[in-house]
Image: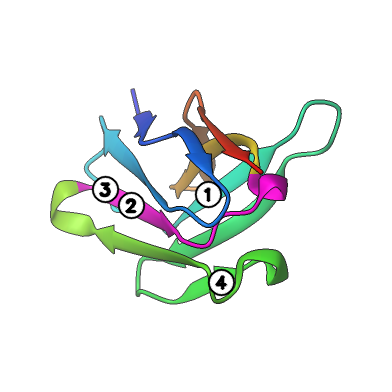
Amino acid sequence: QVQLVESGGGLVQAGGSLRLSCVASGSIFVPATTGWYRQVSGKPRELVAEISRGGSTNYADSVKGRFTITGDSAKQTVFLQMNSLKPEDTAVYYCKASIQIRDYWGQGTQVTVSS
């Protein structure tokens, strides 16, 4: 059973930084892509950043230049470094891994940015 566990969320002031971690377990396969998504109550979940098995990255326009996604395949961990945080970055952040045509989600971690 594939499991994803996120950590690193919390409360931070605007302009501050947080680093989210997503650790995968239960699979012998390296995910084709691993992504971070976020969701605000009442709104659709949106892609923040994703990284492919080969290391290619993709970012939402709203976070380009501020967020960086990196991966450590040996530890099956993906990180999201978030700098220059804004109040509009406040959301629950979810990790998603695409493995063998299936998508797996973590339970989410809350990020709150105060103004």
Instruction: Write down the residue under mark 3.
Output: 77
Of the numbered discs 4 and 1, the one sitting upstream in the chain is 1
Q: Are marks 2 and 1 in contact (CB under 8 Å)?
A: yes
Q: Marks 4/3: CA distance?
A: 17 Å
Where does the N terminus fall, quadrant-wise? top left
Instruction: Write down the residue under mark 2.
Output: 78
Q: Which mark is residue 36?
A: 1
| Residues rendered magenta in the picture | 76-89
Which residue type carries mark 2? Answer: Val
Residue at 61%, 56% (x, y): give it: 48
Q: Are marks 4 and 2 in contact (CB under 8 Å)?
A: no
Query: At numbered mark 3, what does the secondary structure look like: helix, strand or loop?
Result: strand
Of the numbered discs 4 and 2, the one sitting upstream in the chain is 4
> Against 91, is 60 above or below?
below
Q: Which mark is residue 23?
A: none
Query: At numbered mark 1, what does the secondary structure look like: helix, strand or loop?
Result: strand
Tell me, yes or no, if residue 3 can be seen here. yes
Which residue type carries mark 3? Answer: Thr
Of the numbered discs 3 and 1, the one sitting upstream in the chain is 1
Tell me, yes or no, if residue 31 can be seen here. no
Image quarter for residue 59? bottom right
Residue at 48%, 73% (x, y): give it: 57
Q: Are marks 4 and 3 in contact (CB under 8 Å)?
A: no
Query: At numbered mark 2, what does the secondary structure look like: helix, strand or loop?
Result: strand
